[in-house]
Amino acid sequence: MPGIDECLLDAMRLPGALGAALVDWTSGLALGTVGEAPGGDHETTAAEAAELARLAAEHRAFAAGDGEAGGPPDPPVEDVIVSNRDSYHLLRFVPASFDHTVFLHLWLARTDGNLALARIRLGEMAARLVLG
């Protein structure tokens, strides 16, 4: 099972990958980073992405429609996708039995990236990630 560094390096092997980070969405701290950061600063990017992730995770409007009460305390969303004219940002929540407050942030060049492939692979990476 891969650790943080190995997982981030795997993310950078995706077509169009510009940068990746593992971020704690409660504190806004980057637990690991690789590649470029939008705006040039990984810590600022992590804090800003954490605000978006926290918004999606804490508001029931984005929850699955099954209304399952008493289910697992995972965030109600799997991922968040933000696109702009030249890139995609994919925030994938990492399921973990002890701490549900981290997500993978992948930054893709729009011209070279494959959003569908990135979403699938990032989900696989998040499922295999070993924190600790």
Image: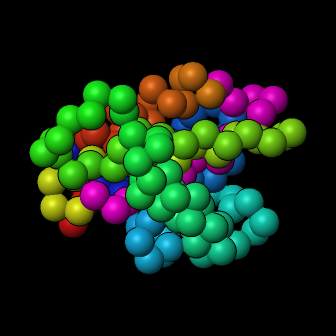
Which residues are the magenta region? 100-114
Residue 110 is a magenta residue: yes
* In this picture, residue 68 sits left or right of residue 102: left
Residue 27 image offset from top left, x and y in percent: 44, 77
The percent coordinates of residue 113 (x first, y second) are 69, 30
Q: Is residue 15 magenta?
A: no
- Where, quadrant-wise, is the C terminus in this rendering? bottom left
Measured along the vertical axis of the image, is residue 92 above or below residue 20? above
- Relative to 113, say whether 82 is above or below: below
Q: Give x and y (percent) for residue 49.
A: 59, 61
Colour style of the rendered protein structure: rainbow
Q: Is residue 131 left or right of residue 89?
A: left
Residue depicted at x 69% and y 35%:
16
Q: Identify the residue at the far right of this view.
A: 85
At 34% across and 50% down in the image, what residue appears? 75
For the N terminus, give its image quadrant: top left
- Residue name at image x 47 percent, y 44 percent: 61
119 in relation to 2, above or below: above
User: Is 33 placed left or right of 81 in the picture?
Assistant: left
Q: Quadrant of residue 72?
A: top left
Res 22 seen here: no
Expressed as whole percent of the image width and height from the top left, the position of residue 9 reads: 48, 48
Instruction: Count the labels in the image.
Output: 0
- Any part of residue 19 in sight: yes
Q: Quadrant of residue 117?
A: top right
Figure quadrant of residue 37: bottom right
Q: Nearer the viewer, residue 62 or 127?
A: 62
